[in-house]
Image (cartoon, rainbow, N blue to C red):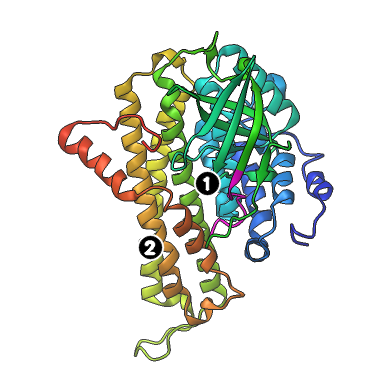
């Protein structure tokens, strides 16, 4: 049975009689279970290109959606360090669903990034208790949504060309600029409403199941009291507010690594079971596993991914400590240093991941290019999302830190 055939209730039954994980290792093991289910027919689901409602239900039933949610409301109360590993693990089975989960964690944390203590408590209770999934209509490369005041309400309108999570989400994060000011306002709203209209136009080379198409926001009303971080209609800024970008950039790097790990796992399994040794080299082998060039090739690729994993684990622990520390403690310098380390991890993971996703064809052989094998999904997924923002600028950020001792200023992409 594949996930596309299975009923959500049947998937939920997998964990009905299983104790809820109690620690990070348990939740990472749960994520591996999810990845194994997703991997079984990831290629077929990618080709079908249907909205991943069943896949999202799988994330919910497994408990992964509320990984960062407070324990008092039924969440796991885990750290971002665990969340990053969970994202990477799920992405090994399906890069699209790893991205959906990673973006959800970022937007679920959005209240903690910018909101008041009262707003944080309300949002976390709402999404954790209801097992809600977040999406976000926040794309800085588009014009900002416009916001007009109407008494005690704010009214959001505009268009965003990307909105990951789309209609599979329960809650959507909106961001816009208040008319006549330069004031940016974030708000969290229910996705299922007339004023949020998805175009269903996501048609990219990879990450096809992320529901990342465009959306029109048509007079979506939000009470002023729900404007994140505003007290008496005035925002109280902290350096901590700007952690959204380093946090999501490391989300990217982790599902990139997961995709690359999935590629090498799938390729090595194919080589073990199907690839034939080369009979014309003068040093003929009995099995592909005896071929020196295959052993060397996999050794080089795996070494790079292990190094990338070590770097991402280290910087994941760094930013997790900051994300869970009191918000008032973060300095601009510390924030910038973490952003540089994340930039380094991201650029290495992209370069190495793309190499892995390409080289695996040389290590599996000509027959592995068959459509039925589906090894192309890893390159397509990684190539698509790694173009999110130019990697050349990440290299420059690291270089400025090394040569000039400068850290990047906070922006929508740094």
Alpha-carbon neighbours of circle 2 within 10 Å: few (<14), some, or many (≥20)?
Answer: some
The residue depicted at 78 percent of the width and 62 percent of the height is 1
- Residue at the spot of label 1: 88
The percent coordinates of residue 122 (x first, y second) are 67, 18
The percent coordinates of residue 382 (x first, y second) are 47, 57
Rendering quarter of residue 352? bottom left
Report helix, strand or loop for mark 2: helix
The residue depicted at 59 percent of the width and 50 percent of the height is 213
Rendering quarter of residue 342? top left
Is residue 210 on the magenta stretch? yes
Asked whether residue 24 appears in the rendered view, the answer is: no
The percent coordinates of residue 338 (x first, y second) are 35, 31
Q: Nearer the viewer, residue 109 or 268?
A: 109
Q: Looking at the image, is 221 positioned above or below residue 278?
A: above
* Mark pair 2, 1: CA separation: 18 Å
Q: How many marks?
A: 2
Report helix, strand or loop for mark 1: helix
Give the label on residue 251, or none.
none
Which residues are drawn in magenta? 206-215
Q: Is there CB contact under 8 Å for labels 2 and 1?
A: no
Give the label on residue 355, or none.
2
Asked whether residue 157 appears in the rendered view, the answer is: yes
């Amino acid at each position: 049975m594949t996930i596309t055939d299975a009923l959500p209730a049947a998937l939920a039954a997998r964990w009905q009689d299983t104790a809820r994980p109690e620690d990070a290792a348990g939740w990472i093991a749960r994520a591996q279970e999810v990845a194994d289910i997703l991997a079984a027919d990831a290629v077929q689901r990618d080709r079908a290109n249907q909205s991943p409602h069943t896949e999202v239900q799988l994330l919910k039933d497994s408990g992964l959606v509320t990984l960062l949610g407070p324990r008092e409301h039924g969440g796991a109360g885990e750290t971002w360090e665990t969340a990053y590993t969970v994202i990477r693990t799920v992405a090994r089975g399906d890069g699209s669903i790893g991205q959906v989960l990673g973006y959800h964690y970022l937007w679920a944390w959005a209240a903690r990034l910018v909101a008041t203590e009262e707003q944080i408590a309300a949002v976390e209770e709402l999404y954790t208790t209801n097992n809600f999934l977040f999406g976000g209509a926040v794309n800085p490369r588009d014009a900002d949504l416009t916001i007009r005041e109407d008494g005690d309400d704010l009214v959001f309108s505009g268009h965003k060309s990307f909105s990951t999570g789309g209609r599979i989400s329960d809650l959507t994060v909106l961001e816009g600029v208040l008319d006549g000011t330069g004031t940016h306002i974030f708000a969290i709203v229910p996705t299922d409403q007339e004023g949020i209209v998805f175009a269903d136009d996501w048609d990219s080379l990879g990450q096809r199941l992320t529901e990342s198409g465009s959306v029109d926001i048509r007079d979506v009303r939000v009470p002023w009291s729900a404007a994140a971080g505003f007290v008496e209609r005035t925002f109280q800024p902290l350096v901590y507010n700007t952690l959204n970008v380093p946090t999501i950039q490391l989300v990217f790097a982790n599902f990139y690594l997961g995709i690359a790990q999935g590629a090498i796992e799938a390729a090595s399994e194919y080589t073990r079971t199907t690839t034939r040794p080369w009979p014309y080299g003068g040093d003929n082998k009995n099995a592909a596993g005896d071929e020196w060039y295959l052993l060397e090739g996999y050794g080089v690729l795996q070494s790079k991914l292990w190094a990338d994993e070590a770097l991402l684990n280290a910087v994941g622990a760094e930013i997790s400590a900051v994300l869970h520390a009191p918000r008032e403690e973060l300095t601009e310098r510390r924030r910038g240093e973490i952003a540089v380390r994340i930039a380094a991890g991201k650029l290495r993971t992209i370069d190495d991941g793309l190499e892995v996703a390409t080289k695996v064809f040389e290590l599996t052989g000509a027959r592995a290019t068959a459509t039925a094998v589906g090894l192309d999904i890893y390159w397509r997924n990684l190539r698509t999302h790694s173009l999110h923002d130019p990697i050349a600028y990440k290299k420059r950020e690291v270089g400025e830190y090394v040569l000039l001792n400068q850290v990047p200023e906070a922006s929508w992409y740094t």
